[in-house]
Amino acid sequence: MKMILTLLLPLLLHSTTWAQSFIGTFVAIKGDVKILRNPTNGGENGPLAIYEGVKYSYEIAKIGKKIRPQEIVQSGADGKAKITYPNGDQFVIGVGTTMVMPSITDKSEDQKSSSIQLLYGRLRALISKSGPRNNMKVKTPTAVAGVRGTDFFTRANPSVGTQLTVIRGEVAVNSIAKPEEVVQVKTGFSVEAKSKTEAPPQLIETTKEDLMNLQSESTVKVTKEQLAELSPEVKKTVNALSEKTKDAMLNDIKTENAALYNELKMKQNLDTEEINTAVVAKLYVKAPSAKKKQPSQEEIDAIGRDVYEKYFK
């Protein structure tokens, strides 16, 4: 019996560590963001929310709060959030978004995968090539994207379709209607999988306006007021996770774009937002322009006037 326990212990520890790697932490929040969990028939104490005809208990998301597999994050019309995992992987949830957090799927003893459901809204995902989500699928009402470590942005609307833009790396996308027709989307390109059509996803070149828009939609910063309210323990956790994200991003950039990596390393005290902006700005320089359209004041305010003047004007 003792020998069996000895043999099983490493497997149990591995499973526990793997499960813990799928517990995310909110590191930045703006506006109305909720965590929905525990489907219920009613009768519980506390607030309830109805989604897809099912009642859920919910709580308001706060910086430092944990979120677990298959729980639902829901942002309002003014809501945004950043969720970071222990290895540095990060999800940026945009306004008006409903997303089911990554679940864990055992494919074999030595290969695991995970999947998330972006039911509606906007998501920017930074996934490390060497992390536990490097074999992840993103499922929307009209498309499925296979991720192998990358930085990408997705918009999903069941009545319109899905648009996915690759900022770094490569993503394989197929429509729900024609799963056998897979499109490989590389850095600087986007793909559209429209609803109510049998056509396969259409590959398009990402425009300057698209990049400007996704950068503004995926920018979430902790305010001075929020920072002042955080406990020392939460501040320590958020700072540590931010460093993990920074290291993971730089490690992947090093293998993809050595020149950009060296440029970023020369700059002191860059945070993750600044690295994200620099990556998008590099694509912006070479991207084609759409029909002439000035960015809205809201888009400029979202990323900051100084950032707009420096990188995108």
Image: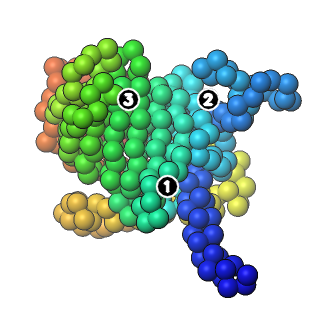
Q: Residue at x 70, y 61 (%)?
A: 233
Residue 163, horizontal then vertical, whole percent: 31, 29
SS state under label 2 = loop
Question: Mark 1: few, some, or many residues within 10 Å (few <14, many ≥20)?
Answer: few
Give the numbered dot on residue 106.
Answer: 1
Q: Nearer the viewer, residue 175 or 81?
A: 175
Instruction: Say which residue label 2 marks.
Output: 32
Looking at the image, tell me whether mark 1 or mark 3 is earlier in sequence order: 1
Looking at the image, tell me whether mark 2 or mark 3 is earlier in sequence order: 2
SS state under label 1 = strand
SS state under label 3 = strand
Whether residue 61 is visible here, answered yes or no, is yes
The answer to whether the residues at label 2 and label 3 have Cβ atoms under 8 Å apart is no
Q: Can you tell which of label 2 and label 1 is closer to the viewer?
A: 1
Number of numbered discs visible in the structure rendering:
3
Q: How is the image coloured?
A: rainbow
Image quadrant in which the N terminus is located: bottom right
Residue type marked 2: Asp
Give the numbered dot on residue 161.
Answer: none
Looking at the rendering, which quadrant does residue 7 occupy? bottom right
Instruction: Say which residue label 3 marks.
Output: 155
Q: Is the residue 288 above or below the residue 85 in the image?
A: above
Q: Is the residue 154 above or below the residue 89 in the image?
A: above
